[in-house]
Amino acid sequence: MSPSIEELVSLAQGTHHNPHQVLGVHETEKGWVLRTLRPFAQTVVMEQKRSKKSLIHVASGVWELEGKGKVPGDYRIRATYENAPDWLAADPYCHTPTIGELDLYLITEGRHEMLWDALGAHYSEQKDSIGDTSGVAFSVWAPNANAVRVVGDFNGWDGTCYPMRSMGGSGVWELYVPGVEPGALYKFQIRTKSGQWITKIDPMARRTETPPATSSVVDVSSYKWRDEDWMAQRERRNALRSPMSTYELHLGSWRGAKNYREIAPELIGHVKYLGFTHVEFMPLAEHPFGGSWGYQVTGYYAPTARFGTPDDLRFLIDELHNAGIGVIVDWVPAHFPKDDWALAKYDGEALYEDADPRRGDHPDWGTHVFNFGRTEVRNFLVANASYWLEEFHVDALRVDAVASMLYLDYSREDGEWLPNIHGGRENLDAIRFLQETNATAYRRSPGIMMIAEESTAFQGVSAPTDFGGLGFGFKWNMGWMHDSLEYIQRDPMYRKHHHGEITFSMLYAYDEKFVLPISHDEVVHGKGSLLSKMPGDRWQKLANMRAYLSFMWAHPGKKLIFMGTEFAQPSEWSESRELDWWLLDHAPHQGMQKLVSDLNHLYTENQSLWELDHEHEGFQWIDGGNADQNVLSFLRFDSSGNPIAVIVNFAGHPHENFRAGLPKPGIWQEILNTDSEIYGGSGMGNFGSVTTDEITSNGRPYSANITVPALSSVWLRLS
């Protein structure tokens, strides 16, 4: 049956939900008919290998050719225009759907774990009897749209001739466009329920233009990984019983905005010298505003183009792996910005966000909150986590702002939030989402880590999902961070009145699997750098900081510091400029960097400092209650019972005859003294070792007299 005039007008106006039903080649009772949409053309011709046939204009830019006998096989459409070059291309509308029934079923069910392989832009190379028909299959989820077109630099950003086909109740629209090459820019034009055309990025785009430009980019990876040994070792690794010290950095301000490839040798050299086991990148997914540090994401599947292509990022990660350095990336599933060209009201209606601002808006950040209860949205995020782990070989995701997802009343006053179905404040949909994300990630990518930045006392963050937990591997210990910083900022004269701040963390140290973070959040927004938090004159500030870092490295839990901390940068971090590397021309800052390097190397070389991080057997107090002297003393053990003794003096004066009870007799080597001259200290110490006496102290049969310099830490290991 021939289409009606109304149907042809609908097609020309872009409101036809299934243009393939009209366009392309169709069998008829008398033979076949070919239709194509070419408004303003003067002539339109079907060209085959050995023949050409002219089409006639029917209405509204639709051209038609009727024929008898065998349905035409391979062909091209040539259109001529006044004062414009000819247009010659394979027909987009002669192709069957490029997305399969199973894909559509899984998308509808919210269970497509490799969503990036189904939606977005996918280039394929193919030929027919005439020649090359390579092109791109475009598909997008827009269930509230009346119509969708694909636009790009390949069609002059005019989607009139490129209406997409609706794939029924799935909400997916698709179109294969021959002739589009990798690197092409594109977006989707979406007709809303109200009849308005809006232009949006591809939520599944794997590459974007460099901000402030916003187009999606057709991407094809040609990268060949070389980290097979690392990946195999990762799969066997027990993260809980392995060392992990992490160097967190903002890529744009570490050494200035360099390409992923250019930065690789410098970053690797620096991290290897310092001895960190991992680097953690602040968010690398595409974001329009650099001042958000990457925490307001618009391109969840696209590494930011500020530093190069996706394959450039693969190179950087590959190089880090081959240097023995793990890679953690910040991931931001809690919220997204309201830019009108991005995810907000994507198809004219609230889609990725909840329509009710009491659920769908975030008051702190001026962003939208994801609608975790919608299956397709949850699928978008669950698959995104797997995408970074699988496509970029990322070793861990640090999940940002988990607390804001867990609680419906987060940063909201009474009347500004809606309770859950039980009347409570927990976001049950978000809890299920986090559990599904973690379970899926660990199942698909053995050996990876999921790390929660969670700032409340929510129970079971790092407990397995089958025990009702959220399923994270680790949780940032924000309590330790807050309390220890409160303590260390006090003048030593007053610290004895606040001794509980520095010891309290051991009361809950095994409630979760903790990472101890001194992150970027602690060195911005007027908080100052870690050095600037310290009391006293310049020498005392540096000594305080050395003692604090050594306490952190000896305390149970994995370690993380932010860039610049390793050399005691005095100024607060700013994303708009690179670190003050010139400070390393000066001895005190060289000394701090040397200390961090030695801390890391001592840490990784001594299992006692990490193997039992999350087990009670790995820690014992020598004396945790010595408030009057401002001293903490404790033991760390490995699974074989090998001890390391740690004595930290947070007083402003030395303790020259400090007796500490020790578990075994013999000579204990002084493996670390933060007052050493090589770190910028005064050089007071124990001449390399102490020997135990059979004198009972701290409830132990053996003890030693130890010199503990002011504002310093001493580590002892049994010879």
Image (tube, helix red, strand yellow):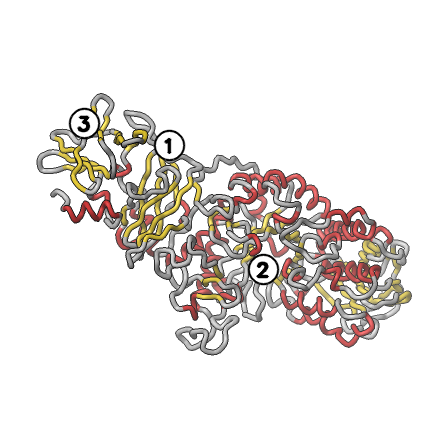
- Asked which secondary structure carries label 1, the reply is loop
Quadrant housing the N terminus: top left
* Left/right of residue 701 with respect to residue 528 in the rendered view: right
* Residue projecting furthest to the front: 83
Quadrant of the rendered image containing residue 174: top left
User: Which residue is found at the position 29% from the left and 47% from the top?
Assistant: 101
Q: Observer-nearest residue: 327 or 339? A: 339
Q: CA distance from mark 2 to mark 1?
A: 43 Å
User: Which residue is found at the position 41% from the left and 47% from the top?
Assistant: 116
How far from the left and from the top, in percent, is residue 319?
61, 39
Residue 53's tag is 3
Q: CA distance from mark 1 to mark 3?
A: 27 Å
Nearer the observer: mark 2 or 1; the answer is: 1
Q: Which residue is mark 2?
A: 474
User: Which residue is found at the position 47% from the left and 58% from the top?
Assistant: 336
Q: Which residue is mark 1?
A: 125
- Asked which secondary structure carries label 2, the reply is strand
* Left/right of residue 196 with respect to residue 585 in the rendered view: left
User: Which residue is found at the position 50% from the left and 64% from the top?
Assistant: 366
Q: Are the residues at dot 2 and dot 3 in contact (C-beta closer than 8 Å)?
A: no
Q: Earlier in the sequence, mark 2 or mark 3?
A: 3
**CA neighbours of label 1 inside 10 A, class few (<14), some (14 to 19), many (20+):** few
How far from the left and from the top, in percent, is residue 184?
42, 38
Going by the numbered disc 2, the residue's amino acid type is Phe
Q: Observer-nearest residue: 10 or 363? A: 10
Q: CA distance from mark 2 to mark 3?
A: 67 Å
* Left/right of residue 85 with respect to residue 524 in the rendered view: left
Q: Earlier in the sequence, mark 1 or mark 3?
A: 3
